[in-house]
Amino acid sequence: MGSSAKRKKEKKKDFQKVKLKVGKTKTKPANYTDTSFKAKSIVLNQQSLSVNTTSVAAQCSHHLSLLSHKSDTQRRDSLAYLTSAVTNTAPGSPLPQPASVILPAIQRLVLDGSKGVREQCLKLFQSLPSGDIASHTDQLLLYTRAGMNHLAVEIRSFSLEVLEWLIGTAGDEVVSCAGGWVKTLKCFLNLLGWQTQVNGKWSANKSVQTIFAGKAAAGDTKIQVKQMNALASFLRAGLVPSKGVMADKSDSACFPLWHNGHHIPSERSNAYAYLNLFGAARDEETEMYEDREDRQRIFHEKAEAAIIAGLEQAKKSGGEIGRAAATLRKVVLEGMGDFRGDEILAV
């Protein structure tokens, strides 16, 4: 009796309509199967997972564009990458970017305010092939002279290092390019304070007189010595004849052929640049002085008297300045010895 009533109640339950209450979800049937699932993924924005990578030339071009970045760390890292790319190039193979593209982009960094950027810039200069530097000497010398006259002592000192490297790499082009001889001489005279007045008397500015009197700081003395050593290298490149020229004058083994160097094709990229056929008119400062005799004449007229008087005063101070003055005096004596008598340089 009881089991029969229970069975009837269960059968009736299957046909009963469930009353839904507000706010409650409908109950799920007994044969309900849960088909929901969850998925996890990693999304990489602006990153390609393809196998193809950019070439070294494209990366160098990208880093050249980053040399104007506002962050000095980014500029230094870009210069470091360019340096490694140039040094890793096999001998005889073309550079990832030609020197005609690299040099105009990095030469302005000579005046950069960051020491790390300037040092890395010099390393990149030194890694470039020396044959590619000659055709860009005039522009490099322009930025170098601007650095030599900079207000910051660190930039002035660094510009002298760049000038030393430039003279060692392309010394003939430095002293013979347009404005390279006269403008650089005047720049050195202004830095050292050695000036010749109209009446022929030598004068030095107050800072130089203080250095000669022994009252300057150690940093001023070091920069003074560095300037005199750089001037000695510059005058040696412009006034002292090279060994090849001396051998050509004294060697008669090629008789009856004489002065063979004047009859062979020029090694310069622009052999007739001194004619200035298509450029603006030049004055004495911007003229090209390719002959040693012309440089001797200009040096005698513009700077010799002031430099000799300054050297005589510098030798009295002794120490590092005295040794640098002795080295510079030796270079002047050697370079101007065959121009006229050396009695003016006698002690």
Image: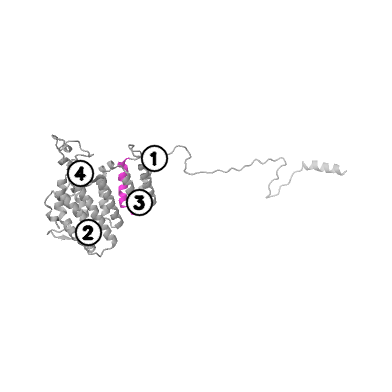
Q: Which residue is mark 2?
A: 322
Q: Amino acid at mark 4?
A: Lys
Relative to residue 320, is residue 337 depicted above or below? above
Q: Earlier in the sequence, mark 1 or mark 2?
A: 1
Residues at marks 3 and 2, CA–CA distance in whole angstroms: 33 Å
Determine the image quadrant of residue 243: top left
Tell me the quarter of the picture where residue 313 sits.
bottom left
Q: Position of residue 195 (x, y in %)?
A: 17, 58
- The residue segment tinted magenta is 98-120
Residue position for label 3: 117
Residue that numbered label 1 is attached to: 56
Residue at (37% x, 47% y) in the render: 80
User: Disc number at residue 243?
Assistant: 4
The residue closer to the viewer here, 311 or 148, is 311
Q: Between disc 4 and disc 1, whose residue precedes? A: 1
At label 1, the amino acid type is Val
Residue 340 percent location from the top left of the image: 11, 50
Camera-near label (4 vs 1) is: 4
Q: Is residue 113 magenta?
A: yes
Q: Tell me which corner region of the image, top left, top right, bottom left or bottom right, holds residue 325.
A: bottom left
